[in-house]
Image: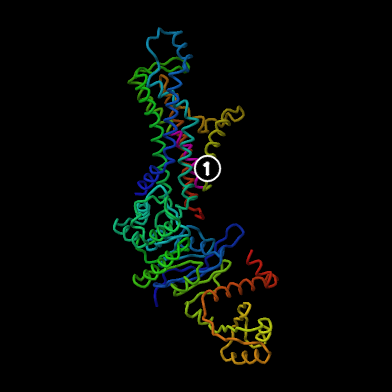
């Protein structure tokens, strides 16, 4: 029941669609760039150096795979943080949380329902982005084999590429869940949506920067940002299964810790707005 | 003896170093229309927030229907409807959708009940409109509707007439009386509008600086306040000097031509005679009807004076501090 209420509120809120609109605009701009420019010349040159190329590697599979690379550290976390950061903070600021919690409903249940709504949104946004890119790519360039140039040249048949793409978007969704969980905890703690969004983004970029500093090398395996590009391991042969499971584990632990922290704060906090 | 519906014991709330509610103990019985009065910042809203579990007390407890609000929140609130401060709703949803969501959180209710409460507050014809385009008064009425939605036995209303036009205020007063008298609901009403409280409440509790300074039946409190006599005189300053010498006499208020004095009835002829003998022109002597407003203002002023005395301030400084 609570979950249905939270989903109703989420899908009726105009701000929810900013993420979808933003990703659609981005896909549109990507296509304009591909049609008018020549952004993948280096891949073409690499391929021509080793193979006789007939046709084009530009297709739905390539675009769907390329998009993850472009958005996983930028737009996807931003739109995810916007929704997770809004879950508690905006209701607290608007006073609707007060109206809601005057009723005989458990705060933990409300908090869990809100978090699960965020999880649903992350899934919809991530897979929606992938599906949108794939369908648009299919429409404009058609389907075909997936060519990946990453420490070598990998060519996956259409039947092989699609499950790998689905898994890659799944991993991207887990990454986004981690960012979202941080925004959720901050949303509960700060009661300020903008502060939660900025805080989550700063945490993500901050940890990414720390992971690049040689002195903190020992921390790298424990930083979730070090695992956000683990999806690349799906486009290798054999698939880097160990790395991927380790990445999922680390990111889910981060998500669980921040979700629990958010719920504990939400359960105990005074509603003063 | 009617059962206790709402009870606080030594309820205390500190925000940092500031004490908002201080050792507050009060009782509301079934069928009471209880007026909860106090100046701004007296701790009324914080108390109400603790009553509905929005704020955790630093010390003490609040119980609804004998159940501790912190320990048994769900059961305690199941028979309670509340409007806490200005009502807030999801602006992108209609009035009906908002109520539907809130009804689900209270365990659900039929569409018919939503229609009933919307009709009760005069918003049935606007049920499908988005709350975002409602005026403040309409939101206030929707706030009252959501409090009534689960057909609660106890209704807590925090400033329910704020933002309403005179007609709307009258409607809400009539609604409160209807809920209490005809439907047997218990009402806990916080309000700044003293004449409103006087008209609808059977009991009042007055808080100042977080403390409960007086509690009782409206009729008995006003009975104690009776005995204020208004003297319309030619020279107010001279008359004040003369009346100040009457044993037990205390000047309550003054205007350019009148003095209101609390005095024992058997001292009135003596006061009358003293004024005439002192050459003060005496135009009229009227027994002033006791009002909750006078009672409240005197009580709050007395509390401020007492507080100022404890802090070593003069009466004028205390009044200035109170205004600040």
Residue B128 placement (x, y as % from top left): 34, 51
Determine the residue positioned at 43% across, 48% down: A111
- Determine whether, in the image, residue A27 is placed left or right of residue B232: left
Secondary structure beneath disc 1? Answer: helix
| Number of residues whose C-alpha sits closer than 10 Å to that of mark 1, classed few (under 14), some (14–19) or many (20 or more) | some
Q: Is residue B150 above or below residue A92?
A: below
Chain of the residue under label 1: A
Residue B137 placement (x, y as % from top left): 44, 59
Residue A109 placement (x, y as % from top left): 40, 50
Q: Quadrant of residue B3?
A: bottom left
Q: Which residues are magenta?
A: A174-188
> Is residue A143 inside the magenta stretch?
no
Q: Is residue A93 above or below residue A29?
A: below
Q: Nearer the viewer, residue B132 or B221?
A: B132
Determine the residue positioned at 43% across, 56% down: B139
Residue B96 placement (x, y as % from top left): 35, 53
Q: Where does label 1 land, which residue?
A: A194
Q: Is residue B176 above or below residue B288?
A: above
- Determine whether, in the image, residue A61 is placed left or right of residue A197: left
> Is residue A177 inside the magenta stretch?
yes
Determine the residue positioned at 68% across, 81% down: B237
| Helix, strand or loop: magenta stretch | helix
């Amino acid at each position: 029941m609570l979950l249905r209420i939270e989903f109703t509120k989420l899908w009726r809120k105009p701000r929810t669609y900013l993420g979808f609109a933003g990703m659609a605009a981005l896909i549109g701009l990507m296509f304009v760039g591909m049609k008018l420019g020549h952004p993948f010349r280096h891949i073409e040159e690499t391929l021509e150096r080793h193979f006789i190329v007939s046709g084009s590697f530009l297709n739905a599979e390539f675009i769907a795979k390329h998009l993850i690379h472009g958005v996983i550290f930028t737009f996807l976390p931003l739109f995810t943080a916007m929704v997770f950061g809004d879950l508690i903070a905006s209701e607290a600021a608007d006073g609707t949380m007060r109206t809601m919690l005057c009723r005989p409903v458990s705060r933990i249940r409300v908090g869990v329902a809100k978090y699960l709504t965020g999880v649903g949104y992350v899934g919809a946004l991530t897979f929606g982005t992938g599906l949108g890119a794939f369908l648009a790519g299919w429409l404009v360039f058609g389907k075909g084999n997936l060519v990946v140039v990453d420490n070598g040249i990998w060519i996956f048949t259409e039947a092989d590429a699609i499950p790998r793409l689905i898994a890659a978007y799944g991993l991207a969704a887990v990454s986004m869940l981690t960012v979202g969980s941080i925004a959720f905890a901050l949303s509960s703690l700060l009661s300020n949506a903008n502060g939660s969004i900025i805080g989550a983004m700063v945490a993500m970029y901050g940890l990414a920067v720390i992971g690049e500093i040689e002195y903190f090398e020992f921390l790298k395996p424990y930083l979730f940002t070090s695992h956000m590009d683990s999806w690349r391991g799906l486009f290798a042969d054999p698939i880097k299964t160990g790395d991927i499971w380790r990445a999922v584990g680390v990111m889910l632990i981060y998500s669980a810790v921040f979700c629990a922290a958010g719920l504990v704060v939400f359960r105990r906090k005074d509603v003063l707005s | 003896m009617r059962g206790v519906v709402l009870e606080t014991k030594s309820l205390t709330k500190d925000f940092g170093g500031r004490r908002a509610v201080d050792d507050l103990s009060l009782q509301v019985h079934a069928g009471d229309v209880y007026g909860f009065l106090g100046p701004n910042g007296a701790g009324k809203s914080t108390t109400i927030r603790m009553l509905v579990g929005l704020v955790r007390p630093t010390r003490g407890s609040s119980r609804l229907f004998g159940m501790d609000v912190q320990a048994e929140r769900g059961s305690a609130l199941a028979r309670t409807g509340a409007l806490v401060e200005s009502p807030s709703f999801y602006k992108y949803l209609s009035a009906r959708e908002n109520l539907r969501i809130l009804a689900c959180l209270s365990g659900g209710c039929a569409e018919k009940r939503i229609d009933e409460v919307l009709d009760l507050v005069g918003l049935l014809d606007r049920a499908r409109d988005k709350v975002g385009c409602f005026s403040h008064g309409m939101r206030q009425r929707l706030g009252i509707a959501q409090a009534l939605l689960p057909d609660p036995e106890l209704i807590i209303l925090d400033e329910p007439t704020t933002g309403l036009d005179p007609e709307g205020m009258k409607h809400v007063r009539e609604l409160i009386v209807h809920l209490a008298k005809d439907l047997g609901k218990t009402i806990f009403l916080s309000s700044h509008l003293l004449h409103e409280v006087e008209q609808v409440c059977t009991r009042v509790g007055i808080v100042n600086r977080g403390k409960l300074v007086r509690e009782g039946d409206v009729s008995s409190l006003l009975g104690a306040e009776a005995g204020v006599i208004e003297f319309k005189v030619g020279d107010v300053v001279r008359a004040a000097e003369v009346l100040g010498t009457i044993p037990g006499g205390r000047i309550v208020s003054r205007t350019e031509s009148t003095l209101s004095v609390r005095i024992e009835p058997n001292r009135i002829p003596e006061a009358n005679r003293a004024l005439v003998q002192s050459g003060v022109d005496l135009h009229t002597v009227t027994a002033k009807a006791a009002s909750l407003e006078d009672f409240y203002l005197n009580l709050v002023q007395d509390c401020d004076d007492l507080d100022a005395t404890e802090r070593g301030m003069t009466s004028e400084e205390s009044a200035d501090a109170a205004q600040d």
